[in-house]
Amino acid sequence: MTALITTPEGLARLAGDLVGVDAAGLDTEFVSERTYRPVLCLVSLAWPGGEAVVDAIALPDLRPLAPALTRPGFALVLHAASQDLVLLEERLGSVPKFVFDTQLAGAFLGHGQISYERLVQAVLGIRLEGASGYSDWTRRPLSEEQLRYAREDARHLPALHRALATDLDRRGRREWFEEECRLLRERSLTESAAGEAWQRVDGARRLKPSQMAVLRELAAWREDEARRADLPVGYVIRDAALTALAQQAPRDLEALGRVRGMAGGQLRRYGKDLLAAIERGLACPREGWPELPEPPREEPGVRLVSDFLASWVRKRAQEEGLTGSLLATRDDVAALVRWHRAGECGALPRVFAGWRRGLVGDELVDLLEGKLALALVEGGLRLVRPGSSGAGRRSRP
């Protein structure tokens, strides 16, 4: 029977059990509908010979687990790790040095970016039931069905880890995978500043730069207020009302009350703060007005070349047994074309960095420069050197 850990003593024993383990699977259960940040409710762990479910509501301090989970040489196995890593960083104060994301490993092995249930069935031949996934994990006591679901979500991660790692090594993709896991870990721990919150407001792009300056102040205030009150930002003020305030820029409470979407309770609770944020935005000098970067506009030539190159990316992904979007999306290819046309200035495009460059990035640039060409040979695409008689794809150094 899996232990349900609800006491500091039990947590300390679990930390001790994990010290001698090289890898463990971990999954979280959380709710996020009514709070600024997701509320972590359960942490399920499984390792060879053991498993446990930690009640994260009964145990708000999970830091005793940190030394075991973040020590050198230990691998934490997760599926679709991004949200789990954010929650662990908040509750442990740190994150593991090495993360093994089984969803990402599956994508490197041609399974696609699929759910945990589907990957377990595809790799291990085990069919799981997911009836309790969407339930209120904050309520106590937990039902036996909820506990069974929580256990199952971590139980098969160690076996997945072994099977997928073996396959990655057999196919020579461990380095690619580990590079991508490092990037995933870094992205998950990068939090957007409140001053950038205006860029995520629906309708921001329709505003004038002077109005965007007001929106920037309003959105930063809303982000701070939502964090302080532990509410979703939309519970404070909805996006539509925020953009209306930025457009109309009311200067007093009476005008504020005439803005569509402003409720009486919001006026009483936030009126003075909203007017102060609007004043700060209006006082911003012209040179400080923000601008949303324009979405890349594809010239017809860029669109045509990108579509042409994307066909080769799909072919390479198929040859390598990779999920196509993992290798490069259509937008990744278009970014490479624009970067090349700009004289290779600026940050390296995703498809021309890291493991992707050697696999397909160099070939795409050689195609852009006319050093290679695509030919249709026996119904399939092949890379050829212009003027050569051979039709086979060149071998890469």
Image (tube, grey):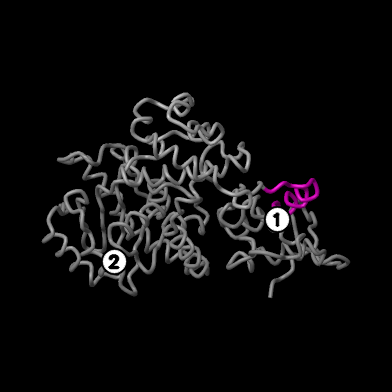
Q: Which quadrant would residue 266 be assigned to in this image?
A: top left
The answer to which of marks 2 and 1 sits earlier in the sequence is 2
Task: Check disc 1 and report its element: helix, strand or loop.
Answer: helix
Depth check: give the residue in front, 129 or 185. Answer: 185
Q: Position of residue 99 (x, y in %)?
A: 39, 64
The amino acid pointed to by label 1 is Trp
Check the image and report above or below for 122 versus 339: above
CA neighbours of label 1 inside 10 A, class few (<14), some (14 to 19), many (20+): some
In front: label 2 or label 1: 2
Figure quadrant of the C terminus: bottom right
Residue at the image point whose x is 80% and y is 61% from the top = 373
Q: Position of residue 356 (x, y in %)?
A: 61, 64
Q: How many numbered markers are drawn?
A: 2
Residue 307 is inside the magenta segment: yes
Residue at the image point whose x is 49% and y is 64% from the top = 177
Depth check: give the residue in front, 199 or 108. Answer: 199
CA neighbours of label 2 inside 10 A, class few (<14), some (14 to 19), many (20+): many
Q: Is residue 123 left or right of residue 60?
A: right
Q: Position of residue 228 (x, y in %)?
A: 32, 46
Confirm or deny contact between disc 2 and disc 1 (CB under 8 A). no
The residue to which callout 1 is attached is 312
The residue to which callout 2 is attached is 69
What's the CA distance linking mark 2 and mark 1? 42 Å
Residue at the image point whose x is 66% and y is 46% from the top = 295
Depth check: give the residue in front, 157 or 351. Answer: 351
Depth check: give the residue in front, 190 or 253. Answer: 253
Q: Is residue 99 left or right of residue 151?
A: right
Task: Check disc 2 and report its element: helix, strand or loop.
Answer: helix
Q: Position of residue 367 (x, y in %)?
A: 77, 62
Which stretch appears magenta? 296-312
The amino acid pointed to by label 2 is Leu
